[in-house]
Image (spheres, helix red, strand yellow):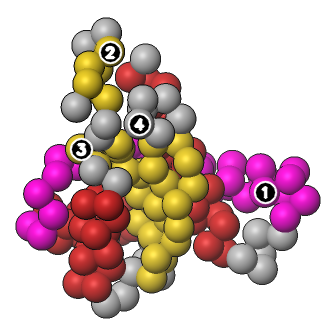
């Protein structure tokens, strides 16, 4: 692994948008500057999706997972956020990689708007919204690090 001005090169950051049906997955470039789309995976059964996340982490040499936390607009933790936190605990038990949380309020709406502006129909491919949300979550995190 190399270092460039205090930052290690070679390990990537994985971004997750955890939903009740699917998980949007994005990956950083090796320099941890930009978020790239990866895929959407089915969440159920949870054990199988956690295994797939572990495989992705191995394949891309992931050093950190950033997961979106869907807080309520007032900043409180609701049912959806509790579900995400519960799922992330399952990841922590099975994938030995640190997980950080990133506020994801409005990312799905922004992702839908961006897709429409690109001429894509998000209503037909909900996976596109999940992947786009994961990109937004990860890019927001990467931008804060700079």
Does the residue at mark 2 contact the one at mark 3 (Cβ under 8 Å)? no
Residue at the spot of label 4: 30
Mark 1: few, some, or many residues within 10 Å (few <14, many ≥20)? some
Residue where numbered disc 3 is placed? 63
Is residue 107 left or right of 54 when viewed as pictured? right
Q: Quadrant of residue 64?
A: top left
Q: What is the C-alpha distance between the residues marked 1 and 4?
A: 26 Å
Q: Position of residue 127 (x, y in %)?
A: 62, 73
31 is higher (above) or lower (below) than 39: above
Q: Is residue 85 magenta?
A: no
| Gap between marks 4 and 3 measured at Cα | 11 Å
Instruction: Tell me where residue 119 appears, x and y as whole percent.
Output: 90, 59
Tell me what residue is drawn at x 28 percent, y 49 percent. 62
- Earlier residue among tags 2 and 4: 2
Q: Is residue 78 visible?
A: no
Q: Earlier in the sequence, mark 3 or mark 1?
A: 3
Q: Quadrant of the N terminus?
A: top left
């Amino acid at each position: 692994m190399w270092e460039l001005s205090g930052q290690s090169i070679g390990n990537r950051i994985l971004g997750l948008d955890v939903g009740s049906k699917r998980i949007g997955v994005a990956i950083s470039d090796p320099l941890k500057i930009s978020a790239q789309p990866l895929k959407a995976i089915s969440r159920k059964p949870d054990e199988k999706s956690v295994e797939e996340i572990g495989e992705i982490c191995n394949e891309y040499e992931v050093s950190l997972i950033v997961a979106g936390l869907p807080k309520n607009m007032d900043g409180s933790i609701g049912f959806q956020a509790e579900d995400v936190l519960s799922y992330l605990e399952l990841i922590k038990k099975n994938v030995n990689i640190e997980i950080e949380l990133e506020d994801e309020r409005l990312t799905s709406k922004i992702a839908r708007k961006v897709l429409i502006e690109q001429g894509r129909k998000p209503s037909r491919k909900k996976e596109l919204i999940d992947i786009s949300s994961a990109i937004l979550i990860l890019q927001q995190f990467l931008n804060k690090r700079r």
